């Protein structure tokens, strides 16, 4: 899952990004409200974490602009202003959730999971396809009850396929969901990750099918 | 014991002089009642004596005095007065009456005691034609004083009642007037005491007199000042809370990261960063405290004799490691002690903030110079750095609390310069910003010499 973090305090942005990457999220960080629209256009972000106190273009303004253009990406607002008035204002402008600083990372992550479940129209925290299971709380894959060891990239690809299980995911969609702005997006690298994933899934009921010219598809072959 | 009640005071000021005047008035009215009674009694005595005298005639060649009843009865006023008389010839021969009745003058009458009674008596002389050497005869009439005194009492008591009524009515009107006059004050008191006025709104007292209006106005001005101060305080606390939230979120994030990270070197990196964050947070807390102490009224004004040179040297020594770590050439340029009067702790804190700012914005390899001098009878402290400087149109704003230059990426709190200004102004000095000769910022603080 690729997230966009908008926070002007560079240190907090850095460390929050690092911490979310620990949990196998792909994270892009921008420090300025004016960069948000561009970032969202360039990547397939499943969720935005938006600080309200931003230089040049404030968080509320960013939110208003996004919603006015019909962008429905889930937005969790972060703010140092914990007043009721501030919270209501944020939610009225189209925020999906609200978190006051200082917060615990665990709480932010829980709220991220809630938003992602809602987007993917799930209520259960566990996603299964055949004997492959993804626990969205621990953010770990397990195959036939055994935890599956994956690199962050492999994890990102598999998570994307898992969320869309049973449907085709194009190579371009995979690419924009797993590469952050720091990495040169190399679509051919996706073939390598898929190849490795297939090896790790060997002998299980699930398989990643290639549909030429269309993309990949995760299915229960059992 | 001083009287504390305005009502009692005013009542005393009005009623006591009035009562005094009434007393004097009563005394004079007593005198005039007495004079009136004397006059009336004299007239009656004269009338009585004349009536007796006119009945004295030569009857058969002998001088005969018959007392007519009317001459006695005219004194019968219901006060049971006794009347005494004596009629005698010019030679002193008694014709009729009481021989031992005292001698009396003609008008006015005199007062005498006769047979244990006080009397008023006078003598009337009357020529009797044909009486020869016996003429003129003299008639002495005396009357006891019951009727006289009753008349005095009557005249005087009614005057007394009038005076008393006057004083009482005056007192009542004073109280009524006071009640009306004090009503706006009572309303003012109620308005101030009212439980639903926690918001320090201006008080409006309807019908306040021109004497009370200034009190209401002064109270409102005072409350406005308190309200402004409270608003400033609230803004400051809200800002301070706001400033503390992001660093706290950062520290919490760094701690979470370190807890989850299994790679030792990355955990180490997170812990080092966490330590730095906590140091900065401590510095921020200290700055907030300094500011709240610099606030007027929050600390007893002090006038320590502070040697700025010594204070600056001390601050630079503490800051030297940070400067060395970033290869910044940190220097002190002084020519001896420069003593000023002020709060020593706050003045040192001011220098800390100036040097801290200079070091923060000076790039690695740059120079920061603290210079002390006496110029025109003032102590002048300048801190020059090699940083980016502050644009002219921003220079007034940077002294505002929490103000940060747009696009500034340094992790300053926006408090340093506002601390400097508050401390300097408290010590009776001023602070100005200027461009350095080779770029950078020069902060100049001028303080009166001690």
Image (cartoon, coloured by chain):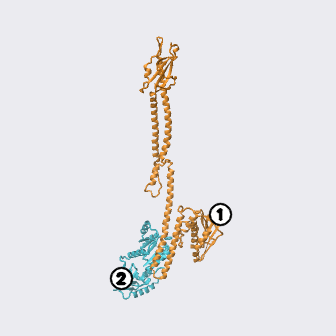
Does the image show residue B206?
no
Chain to which mark 2 belongs: A
Q: Position of residue A144 (x, y in %)?
A: 36, 85
Q: Nearer the viewer, residue B114 or B383?
A: B114
Which disc, if any, is residue B241?
A: none
Which residue is label 1 attached to? B377
Q: Secondary structure at mark 2?
A: strand
With respect to residue B28, does B14 lie above or below?
below
Q: Which chain is orange?
A: B
Q: Which residue shows up at 50% across the image and 49% down it?
A: B212
Closer to us: mark 2 or mark 1?
1
Question: What is the spatial separation of the Cα atoms under label 2 and label 1, in whole angstroms?
Answer: 85 Å
Q: Quadrant of the C terminus of chain B?
A: bottom right
Q: Nearer the viewer, residue B91 or A62?
A: B91
For this view, does B281 lie left or right of residue B375? left
Does the image show residue B74?
yes
Q: Nearer the viewer, residue A25 or B268?
A: B268
With respect to residue A218, does B50 lie above or below?
above
Q: Position of residue B284 (x, y in %)?
A: 52, 70
In the rendered image of the structure, the colour used to display chain A is cyan
Which residue is label 2 attached to? A129
Whether callout 2 and callout 1 share a subunit is answered: no
Q: Secondary structure at mark 1?
A: loop
Q: Position of residue A180 (x, y in %)?
A: 46, 80
Chain to which mark 1 belongs: B
Question: Which image quarter: residue B426?
Answer: bottom right
Q: What is the crowding at mark 2: few (fewer than 14 residues within 10 Å), some, or many (at least 20)?
A: some
């Amino acid at each position: 899952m690729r997230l966009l973090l908008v926070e002007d305090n560079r240190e907090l942005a850095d460390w929050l990004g690092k911490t979310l990457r620990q949990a196998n999220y792909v994270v892009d960080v921008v420090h300025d409200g004016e960069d948000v629209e561009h970032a969202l256009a360039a990547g397939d972000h499943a969720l935005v974490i938006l600080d309200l106190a931003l230089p040049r273009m404030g968080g509320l303004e960013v939110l208003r602009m996004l919603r006015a253009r019909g962008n429905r990406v889930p937005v969790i607002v972060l703010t140092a202003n914990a007043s009721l008035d501030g919270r209501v204002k944020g939610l009225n402008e189209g925020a999906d959730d609200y978190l006051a600083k200082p917060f615990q990372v665990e709480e932010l992550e829980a709220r991220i999971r809630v938003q992602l479940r809602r987007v993917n129209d799930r209520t259960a925290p566990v996603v299964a396809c055949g004997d492959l299971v993804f626990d969205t709380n621990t953010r770990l894959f397990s195959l036939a009850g055994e935890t599956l060891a994956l690199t962050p990239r492999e994890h990102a690809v598999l998570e994307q396929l898992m969320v869309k299980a049973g449907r085709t995911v194009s190579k371009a969609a995979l690419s924009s969901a797993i590469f952050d702005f720091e990495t040169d997006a190399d679509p051919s690298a996706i073939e390598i990750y898929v190849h490795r994933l297939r090896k790790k899934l060997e002998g299980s009921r699930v398989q990643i099918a290639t549909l030429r010219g269309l993309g990949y598809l995760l299915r229960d072959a059992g | 014991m001083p009287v504390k009640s305005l009502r009692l005071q005013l009542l005393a000021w009005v009623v006591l002089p009035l009562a005094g005047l009434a007393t004097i008035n009563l005394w004079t009215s007593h005198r005039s009642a007495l004079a009136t009674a004397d006059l009336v009694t004299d007239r009656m005595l004269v009338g009585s004596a004349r009536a007796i005298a006119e009945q004295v005639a030569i009857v058969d060649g002998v001088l005969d005095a018959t007392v007519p009843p009317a001459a006695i009865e005219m004194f019968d006023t219901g006060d049971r007065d006794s009347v005494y008389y004596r009629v005698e010839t010019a030679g002193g021969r008694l014709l009729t009456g009481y021989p031992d009745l005292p001698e009396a003058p003609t008008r006015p009458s005199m007062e005498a005691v006769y047979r244990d009674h006080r009397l008023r008596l006078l003598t009337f002389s009357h020529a009797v034609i044909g009486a020869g050497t016996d003429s003129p005869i003299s008639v002495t009439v005396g009357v006891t004083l019951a009727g006289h005194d009753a008349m005095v009492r009557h005249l005087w008591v009614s005057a007394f009642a009038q005076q008393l009524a006057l004083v009482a009515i005056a007192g009542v009107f004073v109280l009524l007037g006071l009640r009306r006059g004090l009503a706006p004050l009572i309303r003012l008191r109620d308005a101030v005491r009212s439980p639903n006025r926690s918001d320090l709104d201006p008080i409006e007292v309807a019908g306040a007199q021109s004497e009370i209006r200034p009190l209401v106005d002064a109270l409102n001005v005072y409350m406005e000042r308190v309200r402004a101060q409270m608003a400033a305080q609230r803004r400051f606390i809200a800002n301070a809370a706001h400033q503390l939230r992001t660093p706290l979120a950062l520290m919490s994030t760094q701690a979470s990261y370190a807890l989850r990270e299994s790679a030792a070197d990355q955990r180490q990196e997170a812990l080092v960063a966490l330590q730095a964050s906590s140091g900065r947070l401590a510095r921020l807390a200290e700055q907030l405290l300094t500011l709240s102490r610099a606030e007027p009224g929050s600390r007893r004004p002090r006038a320590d004799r502070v040697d700025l040179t010594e204070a600056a040297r001390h601050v630079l020594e503490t800051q030297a490691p940070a400067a060395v770590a970033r290869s910044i050439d940190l220097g002190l340029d002084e020519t001896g002690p420069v003593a000023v009067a002020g709060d020593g702790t706050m003045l040192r804190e001011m220098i800390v903030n100036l040097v801290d700012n200079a070091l923060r914005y000076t790039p690695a390899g740059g120079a920061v110079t603290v210079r002390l001098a006496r110029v025109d009878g003032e102590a002048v402290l300048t801190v020059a750095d090699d940083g980016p400087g502050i644009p002219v149109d921003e220079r007034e704003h940077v002294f505002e609390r929490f103000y940060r230059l747009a696009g500034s990426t340094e992790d300053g709190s926006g408090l340093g310069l506002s601390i400097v200004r508050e401390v300097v102004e408290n010590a009776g000095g001023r602070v100005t910003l200027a461009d350095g000769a080779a770029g950078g910022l020069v902060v100049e603080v001028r303080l009166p010499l001690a």
